[in-house]
Image: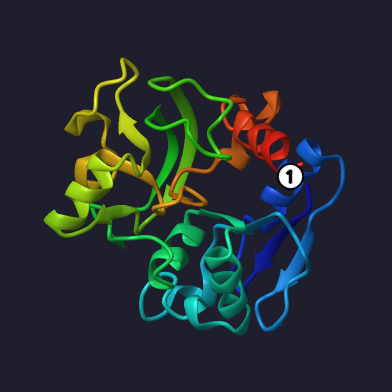
């Protein structure tokens, strides 16, 4: 499997995900600067977390118009897998590769802690190594992670199985208690219609080694390698 990580001014999780990919693939991913117009031939593109362009205007709004994003959108439309994490999720919604938008957290505070998630769909290159209904724990670190979409979009996302991960309690219940940011339907991550693009607010790359305290993110990268190699 060949992978590329997009780097924006303000990215701060690009190296984290590069390390996770290297551990899974056995080789380093290619780091691609946001002003580049071309992408190497890869099987996976990762849009990492951080504060691209300082989160000016809206989180991800400026990054979505970077030169490299035109090529990311073109590759996604051809079926290349794209993973957007945290700010990357925000960028993918701004680029219209995923439905909905990310608003300010309901509590209007930055959240940085581990959260419990239920795996809702395992029929994808990203989630094939999980069990449906499995509860995992990933860290979150965001101020604008409140997933929002209109009622029709939410009905479609839910009904067509495009919810990838949902915020839950440790017992696996999708309640207000388990929802850290007010996201509609407790949604933590969504797929596009073909499940070739995934955006999620929690950080699987920060739960990939025992020293992290959790290894629940490791199966995501193992699944990608197995599927795309």
Question: Which secondary structure, mark 1?
Answer: helix
Rendered location of residue 19, percent (x, y): 76, 45
Occupied quadrant, residue 57: bottom left
Question: Looking at the picture, does residue 156 appear above or below residue 33?
Answer: above
Q: From the viewer's perspective, is 36 left or right of 125?
A: right
Colouring scheme, one of rainbow, by chain, secondary structure, one colour: rainbow
Rendered location of residue 121, percent (x, y): 41, 32
Furthest residue in direction top, as rendered: 171
Q: From the viewer's perspective, is 206 left or right of 229?
A: left
Badge 1 density bin: few <14, some 14–19, many ≥20, Cα 10 Å: many
Question: Looking at the picture, does residue 106 appear above or below residue 60?
Answer: above
Q: From the viewer's perspective, is 155 left or right of 92?
A: left
| Residue designated by label 1 | 21
Question: Looking at the picture, does residue 129 appear above or below residue 87?
Answer: above
Rendered location of residue 52, percent (x, y): 53, 71
Identify which residue is drawn at 54% across, 61% down: 50
Identify which residue is drawn at 39% across, 60% down: 98
Rendered location of residue 194, percent (x, y): 45, 51
Q: Nearer the viewer, residue 51 or 77?
A: 77
Q: Nearer the viewer, residue 121 or 91?
A: 121
Quadrant into which the C terminus falls: top right
Identify which residue is drawn at 23% across, 41% down: 159
Furthest residue in direction right, as rendered: 27
Occupied quadrant, residue 134: top left
Identify which residue is drawn at 69% across, 29% down: 209
Q: Nearer the viewer, residue 14 or 99?
A: 99
Occupied quadrant, residue 75: bottom right
Q: Exactly how many numbered labels are in the figure?
A: 1
Q: From the viewer's perspective, is 6 left or right of 159?
A: right
């Amino acid at each position: 499997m060949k992978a590329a990580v997009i780097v924006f001014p303000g990215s701060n999780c690009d190296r984290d995900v590069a390390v996770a990919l290297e551990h899974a693939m056995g080789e380093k991913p290619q780091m691609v600067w946001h002003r580049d117009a071309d992408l190497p031939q890869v099987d996976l593109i990762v849009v990492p977390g951080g504060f691209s362009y300082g989160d000016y205007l809206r989180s991800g709004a400026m990054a979505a118009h970077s030169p490299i994003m035109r090529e990311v959108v073109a590759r996604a439309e051809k079926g290349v897998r794209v993973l957007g994490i945290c700010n990357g999720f925000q960028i993918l919604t701004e680029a219209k590769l995923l439905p909905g938008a990310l608003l300010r957290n309901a509590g209007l505070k930055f959240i940085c802690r581990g959260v419990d998630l239920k795996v809702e769909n395992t029929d994808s290159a990203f989630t094939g190594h999980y069990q449906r209904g499995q509860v995992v724990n990933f860290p979150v670190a965001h101020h604008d992670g409140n997933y929002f979409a209109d009622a029709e979009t939410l009905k479609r996302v839910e009904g067509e199985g495009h919810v990838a991960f949902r915020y839950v309690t440790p017992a696996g219940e999708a309640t207000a208690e388990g929802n850290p940011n007010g996201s509609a339907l407790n949604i933590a991550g969504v797929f596009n219609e073909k499940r070739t693009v995934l955006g999620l607010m929690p950080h699987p790359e920060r739960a990939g080694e025992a020293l992290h305290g959790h290894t629940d993110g490791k199966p995501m990268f193992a699944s990608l390698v197995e599927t795309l190699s």
